[in-house]
Image: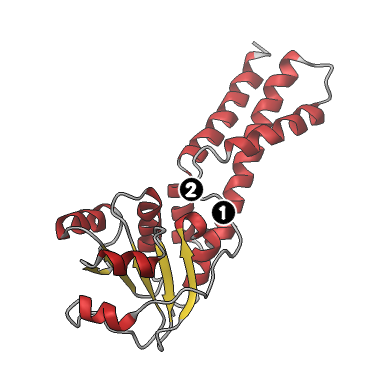
């Protein structure tokens, strides 16, 4: 009986850490919604909770069966395992750090023509995003940018799609894009040349049409999400 209690408590700690890791994105969103914490701070704090909870749970269980091993050693042994558990649901290759560039630009004049004059450069910074509807990183970026936009933490978003209107409508509906303005670009060569053929291709554009920052693929990370927030005011 004396042994079963610490084992049970240890399993609870481990279970909590695994649950938080599998639900990482939704937990972070709740934290951001309820606090003033940024994406970077929220994700680091959550990972710290997961690592400590897993290590503490493992420590309690090890101490039952290896009483000669100092408790602090079993905790330290479990920390790397907890760190691994915190990445059960990875989103990006590199979660933190600025991987943006300013080298790529967009042919705004041609884009205006391709959208029958509907696309225009905005008077304040905005996001211009080239999406592919079957791209996993595009869906992730759309969901997170859409979340930021819904709580006022992102500038205006203009999304561009190849393919059909039906596919674009479905993508928008399923990936938090309801607050995006979006257009179909029928010119495949324009789409590939301006996006760089890497998706999503995300441009932060200023009022003069210049590129303030450009991200592609999974380089649009938590640091980037926090950066675009500074242009939402």
> Dot 2: within a 10 Å radius of its alpha carbon, few (fewer than 14), some, or many (20 or more) residues?
some
Q: Are marks 2 and 1 in contact (CB under 8 Å)?
A: yes
Which circle marks residue 180 in the picture? none
Q: Which residue in the rendered view is the most extreme toward the front? A: 189
Give the quadrant of residue 41. Answer: bottom right
From the top left corner, tell me how far across and down residue 156 is, in percent.
34, 75
Q: Which of 11 and 131 is in front in this view?
A: 131
**On screen, residue 128 above or below 223:** below
Q: Which of 191 and 79 is in front in this view?
A: 191
Q: Is residue 227 left or right of residue 5?
A: left
Residue 15 seen by the camera: yes
The residue shown at (80%, 31%) is: 72
Q: Tell me the quadrant of the picture where the N terminus can be found.
A: top right
The residue shown at (48%, 45%) is: 24
Total marks drawn?
A: 2
**On screen, residue 14 above or below 4:** below
Q: Is residue 161 left or right of residue 25?
A: left
Q: Nearer the viewer, residue 187 or 8?
A: 187
Q: Which of 22 and 205 is in front in this view?
A: 205
The residue shown at (72%, 16%) is: 64
Circle 2 residue: 91
**On screen, residue 52 above or below 92:** above
Q: How is the image coloured?
A: secondary structure
Which circle marks residue 95 in the picture? 1
- The residue tagged with tag 1: helix, strand or loop? loop
Residue 36 seen by the camera: no
From the top left corner, tell me how far across and down residue 116 is, in percent.
17, 79
From the top left corner, tell me how far across and down residue 88 is, in percent.
52, 37
Q: Tell me the quadrant of the picture where the C terminus can be found.
A: bottom left
């Amino acid at each position: 009986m004396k042994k079963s209690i610490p084992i049970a408590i240890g399993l609870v700690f481990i279970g909590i850490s695994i649950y938080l890791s599998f639900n990482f994105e939704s937990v972070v969103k709740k934290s951001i919604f309820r606090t003033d914490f940024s994406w970077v701070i929220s994700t680091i704090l959550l990972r710290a909770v997961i690592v400590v909870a897993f290590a503490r749970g493992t420590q309690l269980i090890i101490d039952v069966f290896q009483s000669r091993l100092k408790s602090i050693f079993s905790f330290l042994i479990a920390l790397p395992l907890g760190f691994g558990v915190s990445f059960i649901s990875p989103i990006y290759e590199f979660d933190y750090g600025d991987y943006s560039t300013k080298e790529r630009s967009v042919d705004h004049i041609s884009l205006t023509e391709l959208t029958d004059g509907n696309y225009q450069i905005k008077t304040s910074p905005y996001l211009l995003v080239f999406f592919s509807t079957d791209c996993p990183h595009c869906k992730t970026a759309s969901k997170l940018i859409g979340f930021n936009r819904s709580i006022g933490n992102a500038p205006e978003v203009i999304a561009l799609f190849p393919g059909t209107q039906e596919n674009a409508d479905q993508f928008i509906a399923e990936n938090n894009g309801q607050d995006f303005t979006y257009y179909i670009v029928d010119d495949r060569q324009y789409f590939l040349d301006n996006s760089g053929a890497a998706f999503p291709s995300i441009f932060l554009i200023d009022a003069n049409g210049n590129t303030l920052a450009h991200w592609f693929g999974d380089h649009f990370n938590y640091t980037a999400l926090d950066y675009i927030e500074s242009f939402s005011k």
